[in-house]
Image (tube, rainbow, N blue to C red):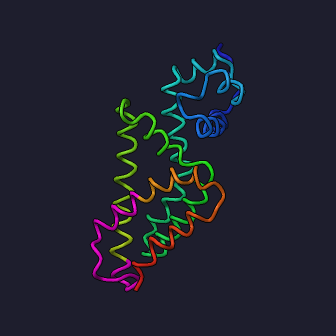
Amino acid sequence: MPRKALYNVAQVLDQAVDVLLEHGFHGAIMDEIIARTDFNRRAFYLEFGSKQQFLYQVLEHYQQQKLAPIISHLTENQGLHSIQAFFEDYVALVKGRGCLLINCIAELGVDDARIREIGRHYLDNLQISFIGCLERAIRHEQIRADIQIESTALQLTCYVQGFAINGILAGQTDELNLATQALLGPLAR
């Protein structure tokens, strides 16, 4: 009879997010991953198969646990309020650490088709969500009616990527909050 696992996979994935944010995929050595997740090497490879497969599960977990609650602001589609709430929570997430998904796209996206696919799906969905919120904001006269919705949504999506990187560099400053105000301010009526 097989023994029951003595670890919680969700907890392991949470701990791995921190390691990968600190070191990146290539910089995160197996010994540290094993030590910080309270795994043993045998259990790690039985559960995940490889470091690469482990990364894909960590990214899926990160998207579900960290990004999905933030994106839910956009799917609620309350116009400009949803966009502001998204950026407020996103800035809090990336402040001083960056975004694991964007970091992985930057580090691995050229060589790893699956990372590119995950990243493209995320950014496309984000842009579509911004389009919906902008359309609602125009209908409810929250923003100027003369904006180009698709290009503005693309701009907002690009800012998300930039904020993820700048979140590392800006540290705990208010730089990203100021940038959000500068980005959204001109849209308002």
Image quarter where the C terminus lies is: bottom left
In this view, the residue in front, 151 or 57, is 151
Image quarter where the N terminus lies is: top right
Q: Does 184 appear in magenta?
A: no
In this view, the residue in front, 126 or 4, is 126
x, y percent for residue 28: 59, 28
Q: Does 145 appear in magenta?
A: yes
- When the figure is inspected, residue 20 is found, relative to residue 151, above or below; the finding is above
x, y percent for residue 131: 33, 67
Q: Quadrant of residue 152?
A: bottom left
- The residue under the point 57% across, 67% down is 177
In this view, the residue in front, 129 or 166, is 166
- When the figure is inspected, residue 119 is found, relative to residue 95, above or below; the finding is above
- When the figure is inspected, residue 94 is found, relative to residue 138, above or below; the finding is above
In the rendered view, does 127 fall on the left or right side of 185?
left
In the rendered view, does 22 fall on the left or right side of 131?
right
- The residue under the point 34% across, 80% down is 138
- The residue under the point 66% across, 58% down is 172
x, y percent for residue 35: 71, 25
Q: Which range is magenta?
A: 137-158
Count the marks: 0
In the rendered view, does 91 fall on the left or right side of 125?
right
x, y percent for residue 157: 39, 58
